[in-house]
Image (tube, rainbow, N blue to C red):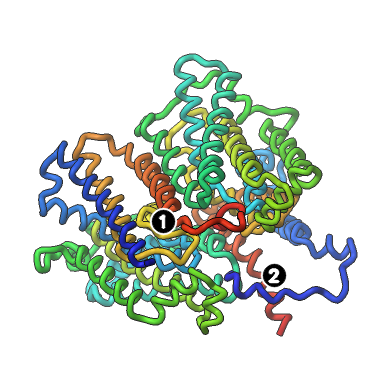
Amino acid sequence: MLRRFALTREAALLAALVALCLLIATRFSGFIAPANLGRVFNDSALLIILTLGQMIVIVTRCIDLSVAANLALCGMVAALLNVAFPGLPVIMIITAVVLLGSLLGAFNGILVWKVGIPPIVVTLGTLTIYRGIIFLISDGAWVNSHEMSAPFKALPRAVFLGLPVLSWCAILCVAGFALMIARTPLGRSFFAVGGNPHAAVYTGINVGRTQFMAFTIAGALAGLTGYLWVSRYAVAYVDIAGGFELDVIAACVIGGISIAGGIGSVFGAVLGALFLGVIKNALPVVDISPFWQMAISGAAIIVAVILNSRSNRPKGRLILRTAGPKT
Amino acid sequence: MSDATQTGRSLPDRLTTRAQRIFRSWEALLIVVAIAIFIANAIASPYFLNAWNLSDATFNFTEKAMIAFAMALLIIAGEIDLSVAAIIALASTAMGYAAQFGVDTPGLVLIGLGTGVLCGAFNGALVTKLALPSIVVTIGTMSLFRGISFIVLGDGAYRGYPESFAWFGQGYIWWVFTVEMLIFALLAVVFGVLLHRTNFGRAVYAIGNNPTAALFSGIRVPRVKFILFVLTGLMSGLAAVCLTSRLGSTRPSIGVGLELEVVTMVVLGGINILGGSGTIPGVVIAAFVMGLVTFGLGLLNVPGIVMSIFIGALLIGVIALPRLFVMVRGR
């Protein structure tokens, strides 16, 4: 029953996404050419990876506002490592930033788990702290394209089986998440904790530890995205991905992940990220000023949250009236 | 914190006296922090103890504090508004647009406040009429409101405000006391009375502690929440008037990230982010603490972005330290 229910919601989102693409195609038919759709997917890859991480955090009734700052810090560290040791293999840099990202995420998690500070407060604080640290380690300077080594910049662009490595990263993350959520105890416990924390405790799940794991995984993905972002755009500075955390949360909301926890799917998260990606890529194509993008994604969030709340409404008869949802 | 760990709540053996409560209160801790920062600043920089410098320093927090007062009530009632900075952008854009047609100062102020009220009512209607979670709604309207500013202005800017409009952000009442300080002080009293001395204020606490119980005790929960959103919008409009008047121009990026500083100020002021508790005096002291930190570090030539580390650490530190203390002592 629940599964069928979820399927219809994602099906509706998929239909909306296809309709959007067709609408754009009436103005510019080249948009739905496979090569262009591939480019749109590649453009959305970074958002997809971050959205997956944010999804499990939101599912466990938390929120991570520090993902973009985490990304930027890891990206800057990757760039500085590359400048300091040009000979260092890229895989070493990636390992380092993924570790750093998971540490930063774990720091959020430990404050939520052991100290019991609400997640929104913790990540609001670490958001500004991580951004500040970027300034400290870089002295506010930019790391530009010519300072980075060729292999460092080439990796996300390298084509493998017809798709850039950047796209493959997103596909691998999606596949890994789908497996983790459907097939591992940890994946199931995210939903158990979000759906009903009290019940989760009585089934032997450590609620705090599960939330800690969600933050750590989200941090590791932010670290990976940090490297991908910096190498793809071939520049690192303090403000990269500024405000991107809101895009990530927007993608989650559009993808049908309930901010109250316990509800969400990998497919929905990917569709939500793609929805924003399509809008971002389509605006210049159909001759709408890119300045419209922010208002359109804002409107999309509001419409999505209204539709989601309609479909999440319990079907039975209301016995006891309550005063609105707990956020 | 998860709900599951809060279930076992114990009652104390002995109730505390009034004096004990005051000394152990959050506000007392904040005052100590504020005084410590003040002394540290005075020692660190010879330019700190100067009436004019201190007066300039108040601009660091007065506009944010105006919003923080209303936000405090909203958070106590268990909601949040992340769109306040975007409301500033939209209100400022509306004022700039009107100023192009020669609307004079009173008209501009009305337009600024009116835009704020409309935006707040929009948030409030979505949250109360459609029963949506406020954090998501206001993340959406945050993009929407600022997005409209971007559509109107693009990469341009509005200038050419009338001369008299500068009074709000640049005017002085007497000696070093600015107009914004007067507004800040008045609002502190108004909100303090509203929250701590009226039925409305009691209703706000009741809703934050248990919205369902509040509903059954006869409080019109949706209406109170709606009013709080409108109030937050109004204060954002007022902050937009002051900020626009001080800067003398409007860009769509005006006040970016300000919502996080406002929430930081509120939480630092001892308002429980989960709702139900907190005081206005706490927010007032938190405003001074944040202003002093920013100003003192500024005098020491610390860049703004590094200051944000201190603000972030302060936010986590003041909440974590008492909890850690209890955890250590409890062993």
Q: Is residue A114 visible?
A: yes
Q: Which mark is residue B31?
A: none
| Whole-percent x, y for residue B9 in the image | 72, 74
| Whole-percent x, y for residue A182 in the image | 33, 76
For the N terminus of chain A, give its image quadrant. Answer: bottom left
The residue closer to the viewer here, A290 or A278, is A278
Q: Find out whether the residues at labels 1 and 2 contact each other: C-beta distance under 8 Å.
A: no
A261 relative to A184, above or below = above
Circle 2: is it few (<14), some (14-19), or many (20+) Cα within 10 Å? some
Q: Is residue A143 visible?
A: no
Q: CA distance from mark 1 to mark 2?
A: 31 Å
Q: Residue at x 52, y 52 (%)?
A: B133
Q: Residue furthest top?
A: B102
The residue that disc 2 covers is B322
> Toward which corner of the image does residue B319 lie, by quadrant?
bottom right
| Whole-percent x, y for residue B129 in the image | 54, 42
Q: Residue furthest front?
A: A317
A261 relative to B299, above or below = below
Amino acid type of the residue that numbered disc 1 sits on in the rendered structure = Ile
* Chain of residue at mark 2: B
Circle 1: is it few (<14), some (14-19), or many (20+) Cα within 10 Å? many
Determine whether, in the image, residue B18 is placed left or right of residue A67: right
The residue that disc 1 covers is A249
Q: Residue at x 78, y 59 (%)?
A: B28
Secondary structure beneath label 2: helix
The residue closer to the viewer here, B40 or B275, is B275
> Toward which corner of the image does residue B121 lie, by quadrant?
top right
* Chain of residue at mark 1: A
Determine whether, in the image, residue A218 is placed left or right of residue B290: left
For the C terminus of chain A, give its image quadrant. Answer: bottom right
